[in-house]
Image: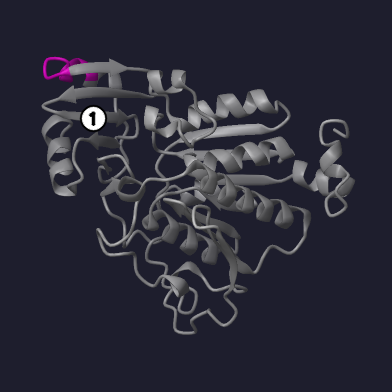
């Protein structure tokens, strides 16, 4: 161990004992796109003992500009990001156990997927999942490290239950549809992704070795040459329904949507109600008369009437060619059923 991590061990705040603590730690990264892939590489190279990657999506060519773990071959094969990332990260550090999970994190599976890990790193691109993580953090006492970026701007903060404000203190409600910038409308630069993800990874290392994480929120714009740390002292809302009254609506499933627009994709994810498993070869045989079908071990894709449907074994579908959730659900019902 000493040779591989020698330069990290030489850093006094980590040292030999800190490295042992990292090797015995378990981290879950929710979302393995831009932020998640950068942070995952840094944490795996640092020798975290176990890293679970949860992602619902597959690799596309447009990801390659900023999602550092993926290659053109991954995009050609349309591999799930969690599968591709697990393979690449394991080749970087075979001493770390990397577990890629191709699922959508929901109130139904959050305990199973996050309950055996020490802390959570946010690599998501939507507020619904972040509110779920916030609820779960408050219920279990687990720290989670938030990150977000769009265009040349990024932000990050470490949410610590009962110590810092929670996400709902800062953002009581999700942004209204169409009111927030997205990768689809404003693009995104890779340098801000790496900066924010590196900051997130640094906070994870601090927490795992027993050091104090930053208590301020990072705000940075790499194009405008602006960076500042914002104090959130006093920002905790005593009347917050979430960390104050413990109304955990997202964790209880009361705020769950069955469809959601995907950032920068001209696509909508549709999630059927209840628990379902899809027999992909059977669905492929049924849909071949309707359009062009391709199938791998994890998902199938069908192109039909100007839309592309990517179907997963858990019943989810990513429907490309529309940003209208009602239209996407209608397409799902038409070709998949229910």
Residue at 38%, 27% in the rendered image:
61
Callout count: 1
Residue at 77%, 59% in the rendered image:
210
Examine the image and state in which quarter residue 262 appears.
top left
Residue carrying label 1: 309
Name the colouring of the figure. one colour
Q: Position of residue 98 (x, y in %)?
A: 61, 33
- The crowd level at tag 1 (other Cα within 10 Å; few <14, some 14-19, many 20+) is many
Tell me the SS state at disc 1. Answer: strand
Residue 115 in sight? no
Q: From the viewer's perspective, is residue 40 above or below residue 196?
A: above
Q: Quadrant of the C terminus?
A: top left
Say if the magenta span includes residue 40.
Answer: no
Q: Quadrant of the N terminus?
A: top right
Q: Position of residue 107 (x, y in %)?
A: 40, 53
Q: Nearer the viewer, residue 9 or 189?
A: 189
Residue at 39%, 72% in the rendered image:
172
Examine the image and state in which quarter residue 318 appears.
top left
Q: Is residue 312 left or right of residue 42?
A: left
Q: Start and end of the magenta stretch?
A: 284-291
Q: Is residue 131 left or right of residue 26?
A: left
Q: Position of residue 315 (x, y in %)?
A: 29, 35
Q: Position of residue 70 (x, y in %)?
A: 50, 28
Q: Is residue 183 left or right of residue 13?
A: left
Residue 167 in sight? yes
Q: Nearer the viewer, residue 273 or 45?
A: 45
Q: Nearer the viewer, residue 58 or 198?
A: 198
């Amino acid at each position: 161990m000493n040779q591989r991590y020698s330069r990290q061990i030489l850093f006094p705040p980590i040292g030999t004992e800190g490295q042992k603590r990292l090797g015995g730690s378990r981290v879950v990264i929710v979302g393995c796109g831009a932020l998640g892939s950068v942070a995952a590489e840094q944490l795996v190279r640092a020798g975290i003992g176990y890293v679970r990657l949860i992602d619902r999506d597959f690799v596309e060519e447009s990801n390659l500009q900023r999602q550092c773990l993926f290659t053109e071959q991954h995009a050609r094969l349309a591999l799930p990001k969690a599968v591709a990332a697990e393979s690449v990260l394991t080749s970087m550090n075979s001493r770390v156990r990397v577990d890629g999970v191709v699922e959508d994190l929901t109130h139904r599976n959050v305990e199973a997927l996050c309950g055996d890990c020490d802390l959570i790193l946010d690599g998501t691109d939507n507020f619904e999942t972040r509110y779920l993580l916030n609820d779960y953090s408050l219920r279990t006492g687990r720290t989670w490290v938030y990150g977000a970026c769009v265009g040349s701007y990024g932000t990050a903060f470490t949410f610590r239950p009962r110590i810092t404000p929670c996400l709902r203190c800062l953002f009581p409600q999700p942004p209204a549809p169409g009111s927030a910038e997205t990768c689809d409308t404003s693009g995104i630069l890779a340098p801000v992704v790496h900066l924010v993800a590196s900051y997130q990874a640094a906070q994870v290392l601090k927490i795992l070795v027993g050091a104090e994480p930053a208590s301020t929120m990072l705000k940075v714009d790499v194009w405008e040459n602006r960076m500042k740390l914002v104090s959130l002292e006093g920002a905790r809302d005593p009347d917050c329904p979430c960390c104050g009254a413990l109304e955990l609506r997202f964790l209880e499933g009361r705020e769950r949507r069955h469809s959601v627009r995907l950032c920068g994709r001209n696509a909508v994810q549709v999630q059927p109600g209840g628990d379902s498993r899809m027999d992909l070869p059977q669905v492929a045989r049924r849909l071949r008369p309707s359009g062009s079908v391709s199938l791998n071990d994890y998902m199938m894709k069908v192109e039909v009437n100007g839309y592309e449907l990517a179907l997963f074994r858990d019943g989810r579908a990513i429907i490309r060619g529309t940003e209208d959730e009602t239209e996407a659900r209608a397409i799902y019902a038409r070709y998949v059923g229910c």
